[in-house]
Image (cartoon, rainbow, N blue to C red):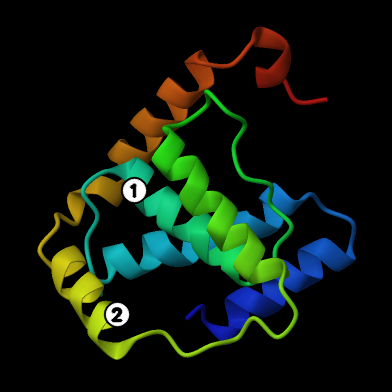
Amino acid sequence: MPEKKTLERAQRDLRTGKSASTAAGEFVREEIHHVREGKHGARSTKQAIAIGLSKARRAGVPLAPPAPGKTSARARESAERAYEAGQADGGEHEPSPRRSRATKRALAKEPKRTVSRAALSRQAKSAGTRRRAAARTSR
């Protein structure tokens, strides 16, 4: 469950006309903070980002799932499910305690170094190289 402040910041971003990916960035920031403070770990920087994006979709941020071919079919299906759950009316439901506990225990064993400044910098640089030059420049 996202923190109240994160939800408020994301809603403020959407209200002020910012893009869905900007609002989702608040959830990614929260997830990185959780890993850094030792709440749980992540196998890779990408995993930490993916968890944040999934939380954003489930919280109702209208962030579309990735296009076919951008990620694995399994990741796309997961993103579609999260998006549908977030867009559904009254989508608030209590997660299964057993499943939630299992997920937390599995993530607790993962490394914390995956969200260090250096790791995030590497991830940003490698993500940038996969984009066209026009998409890398800010307007």
Counting residues from the N terminus, which is met first, the one under dot 2 or under dot 1?
Answer: 1
Q: Nearer the viewer, residue 88 or 43?
A: 88
Say the numbered circle drawn on residue 120: none
Residue 88: where, in percent of width, then height?
71, 73
Please tell me which residue lies in front, 124 or 21.
Answer: 21
| Residue drawn at point x = 61 percent, y = 44 percent | 65
Q: Which residue is identified by label 2?
A: 100
Relative to 50, residue 130 above or below: above
The number of callouts visible is: 2
Asked whether residue 17 is in view, the answer is yes
Q: What amino acid type should be assigned to the residue bearing mark 2? A: Ser
* Residue 43 located left or right of residue 109: right
Judge whether 65 appears above or below 99 on screen. above
Mark 2 vs mark 1, CA separation in Å: 17 Å
Give the percent coordinates (x, y) of residue 47: 34, 48
* Image quadrant assignment for residue 12: bottom right
**Residue ID for mark 1:** 47
Q: Secondary structure at mark 1?
A: helix
Q: For the point 51% across and 78% down, which residue is it?
A: 2
Mark 2 is surrounded, within 10 Å at the Cα level, by few (under 14), some (14 to 19) or many (20 or more) other residues, namely: few
Please give left or right for residue 60 compared with residue 79 in the image: right
Q: Is residue 131 above or below residue 29?
A: above
Question: Identity of the amino acid at label 1?
Answer: Gln
Locate the C terminus and report the quarter of the image it occupies: top right
Q: Position of residue 37 (x, y in %)?
A: 27, 71
